Every structure is written in structure tokens, then in C-alpha cells.
Amino acid sequence: MDFDFSPEQLAMRKHMREFMEREVAPVAAKNDRDCKFDWDIAKKIFAEGFLGCPVPEKYGGLGMDYIAYGLMTEEVNRVCSSTRTLFSVQTSLVALTILKWGTEEQKKYYLPKMCSGEFIGCYGLTEPEAGSDAANQQTKAVKDGNDYLLSGQKTWISCGSIATHALVFATVDKSLGHKGITCFIVDTKSKGFTAAPIKGKLGLRSSDTSSLFLEDVRVPKENILGNVGEGFKIAMSALDNGRFSVAAGAVGLVQGCVDACTRYAMERKTFGKPIGEHQQVQAMIADMVADCEAGRLLYLRAADLKNKGVRNSLETSIAKLFCGEAANRAAHNAVQIYGGYGYSDEYPVERYFRDAKVLNIYEGTREIQRLIIAQDALGIRYANGTPTGRPTALAGAAV
Ligand SMILES: Cc1cc2nc3c(=O)[nH]c(=O)nc-3n(C[C@H](O)[C@H](O)[C@H](O)COP(=O)(O)OP(=O)(O)OC[C@H]3O[C@@H](n4cnc5c(N)ncnc54)[C@H](O)[C@@H]3O)c2cc1C
């Protein structure tokens, strides 16, 4: 692994940092307070072409590598976790999944429009009865001539109400277990498809999270991604990319805490000196800095493997677990360093604290990541013969 970034990677990081400081930082707190998905920001992101960062140029992307993508994701989340959601879903969960599993025709049709923001994607795996146990899909796909009729409910779907297209996982035959699951690209304007935003979220308040309802939604067989029965494999491969962007985003949140706390600790005085000169405050800042550095190395290692095309489910899970936990530790201590003021939305650390929690819930809870890591370490095999941790039906089974 090369520890030096290339001039292109550094330039993209700088470009994203300047964009976020200029366009998002001034409005992030207000959008969070108003629970507003900011279309003006989204349109500026589309115009910059940021959404297609790791998508090859021939499909309309920027053709950057995963290290550049990770660094950019970190910069986005350093300022605003909700904005990062749009990136992660559109790029990691949807565009890269179509890139990997789509036919040439599907790639040519969907990817340029996804990179430009003309199409917005969402990833519909979780259901009321299928979260960690993602193989337990209840949404049905019934063959009807050359089409399939999809019926069921998805919940907690990021970007669900703003999406033009949804990757919907549904079973063609429940008796086949995870081998019956199939992935469909569904136009959200289709008859029978509705979305309802979920209100009252703890964090990510300026991102859209919705439930999806499908009642006999007609989907042509050409809209199957991969083959019938490959949906579970596709869902898990999407998570390898999704978890990567969650890990990089989590490091951004830790960096945001470091930035806010180092500034505040040298301004705020108690007992005649800046609180940054009290050793217990220094200890919290030191832990944050160490978490930030360690987390960054972990997601960059996963990025390096992705660039080389090497299987990286385990390394990505380790990065996702560690960085999600690190973000929660950092945000917890950031509020502590700000004292009573940390409890107010006048300062950003309160938002970081609320936004951190989801990092060890979605794309596989921290417990699911621990299962993946422990199964690999212990060499456990499941009855279906799936090799350990890369991924097993159980451990890989969550978004
Ligand atoms: C803001 C937000 C955005 C989201 N976006 C998306 C999205 O875009 N697309 C999508 O498909 N989903 C999305 N999700 C859903 C998310 O991935 C699920 O909530 C998550 O996988 C957990 O599933 P669950 O909520 O059903 O919890 P459950 O599976 O019911 O788990 C409850 C608790 O039990 C633990 N647990 C469960 N099984 C085990 C086990 N075998 N061993 C040990 N512990 C276990 C879990 O870790 C958790 O602590 C989102 C969720 C949130 C909150």
C-alpha cells in the first residue's frame, strides 16, 4: 500500500473540501433543524459530477479510484452526514451495483443519468421483517408474461421519496430461501409504487428516509439486474461498497469533531486557562485524533484492495465497524468538551452526536459486522457451505 496520495487524489479532496465549506457548511445546521432535503445543494453536487466519482468515464463518471472516492466521502461527511447519504446511496449502493451486475445496455442507459443526477437511485432491501435477517425477504415477484408483478413493503430506505429508480429485492419463490431473491430496477413512477417519508428521526434529518409500498408493480424482465435468483449476492456485493462509504464518512465525522474541539478547547477558558490545557480534555482530544488516524488507514486499506480488484468484504467490515464506533466515541467526547454548549444546536457537535448513531446501525449493524469478523477469525462454516465471513448467509445479511 502506497502511503502517498497522487496529485489527482489530493486535487479531488481539495476540490470537495472547498465545495463543502462554500456550499454546505453555511446551511447544514439550518437544514438539519428544518428537516429539509436541500435540492439546491443536490443540484450543485450533480453539476460538479461528484456522484460519478468512481464510475468509469465511458459511462459518464469521473473515472477516479476508490482512494479518491474515500477521501471525497470523508470531506462530505466532515461537514454534513445527511449530504453524504445522497453520495453513498447514489454512488456506492446503486451506480456501482449496476456497473458490476448490469448488462451493457443497462449500464449505458442508467449510469450516465445517475452520474449527472438526472436519475436518483435508492436501494430497497430492508423490510419490516427483514433488516439484519435480510434473506427473509417477503416482497414477492410473480411472473406475468414477459413482466414481473412486485408486491410488498420496504422500510428505512434512504432517498426513497426522491428516487426516480429503486433497486428492489424481491423473492420469486420463498421456498428457495436466499436463492429465490432477485434484484429489479424499478421506475418509481410505475403504477402501484408509492413512497412515504419517515418523520421524527434522531439524526440525518436533512436526508430523506422513506418506506416504499409496492402493489402489483409491473416490471419488465429486462429490468432484472443480474439473473433471477442472484439478488442476495448482488445485495451483499452492494454492501461491500456501501459499507466502505459509511466507513470513510464516519472518519469524516471524527475529523469534524477534532476540528471543532481543537478550536473550541483553545478558546474556552476555565480556572484561568484554555480548557485545552487541562489534561483530561487533552486525553479526549488525543483519543479522537488516534481514532481518526486509525479509521482512515482502515478505510484506505479497503480502498486499496478495491482498486486492485481483490475481495475485500472482511476488510470493509472491519473498517465499517471500527469507524462507526470511533465516530460515536468522538461525537460523545465532542459534546463533553463543549460542556453545556455542546447540548445546544448552536454548535455543530450536537448534530454530529445525533448523526453518529446510525453509523453502527445501517448497512449492517455493528453486531452484524462483529459476526462477519468473528466468523472469519474462528473459521466457522454454516450448513449451507458458504465460506466463512466472505460473506455467510447470516453474517452478510444486512444493510
Ligand atoms: C437512517 C437509516 C437509513 C437506512 N437506509 C437504508 C437503505 O437505504 N436501504 C435499506 O435497505 N435499508 C436501510 N436502512 C435499514 C438498516 O439497514 C436496518 O435498520 C439495519 O440493517 C438493522 O435492521 P433492523 O432495523 O430490522 O434491526 P434488527 O435486524 O431487528 O436488529 C435489532 C437489533 O438486534 C441485533 N441483531 C439482529 N440479529 C442479530 C444477530 N444474529 N446477532 C446479534 N445481534 C443481532 C441488531 O444488531 C440490532 O442491534 C436504513 C436505516 C436507517 C436507520
Image (spheres, rainbow, N blue to C red):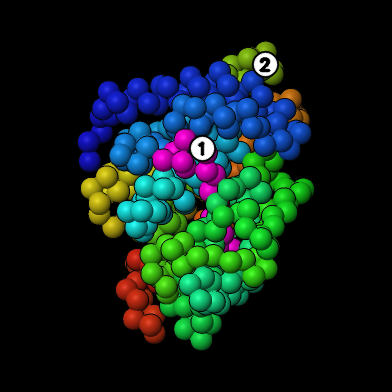
Front-lying residue, 394 or 118: 118
Number of numbered markers: 2
**Can residue 17 be seen at all in this image of the molecule?**
yes
Mark 2: give few (<14), some (14-19) or many (20+) Cα within 10 Å: few
Magenta part of the protein: which range?
112-127
Check if residue 64 falls in the magenta segment.
no
Up the image or down, 129 lies above or below 103; here it is: below
Up the image or down, 303 lies above or below 238; here it is: above
Q: CA distance from mark 1 to mark 2?
A: 47 Å
Camera sees residue 281: no
Q: Helix, strand, or loop for circle 2?
A: strand
Q: How would you rate the neighbour count of disc 1 (Cα within 10 Å): few for under 14, some for 14-19, many for 20 or more?
A: many
Left or right: 179 in relation to 191: left
Amino acid type shown at disc 2: Lys
> Residue visible at 26% across and 27% down?
6
* Image position of 287 (left or right of 280): left
**x, y percent for residue 74:** 46, 34
Tell me which residue sits at (46%, 61%) in the image.
Answer: 223
Magenta run includes residue 123: yes
Name the residue located 52 percent from the left edge and 39 percent from the top edge. 118
In x, y percent, where is residue 259? 53, 24
Q: Mark number for residue 387?
A: none
Specify whether tag 1 is near ligand 1 (CB below 8 Å): no
Residue 262 shown left or right of residue 349 in the figure? left
Can you tell me whether the CB of the residue at mark 2 lies under 8 Å from the nearest atom of ligand 1?
A: no
Looking at numbered disc 1 in the image, what kind of residue is underneath it?
Gly
Q: What secondary structure is found at the residue carrying circle 1?
A: loop
Q: Position of residue 338 (x, y in %)?
A: 67, 28
Q: Earlier in the sequence, mark 1 or mark 2?
A: 1
- Between 329 and 55, the one nearer to me in the picture: 55
The residue labelled by disc 1 is 117
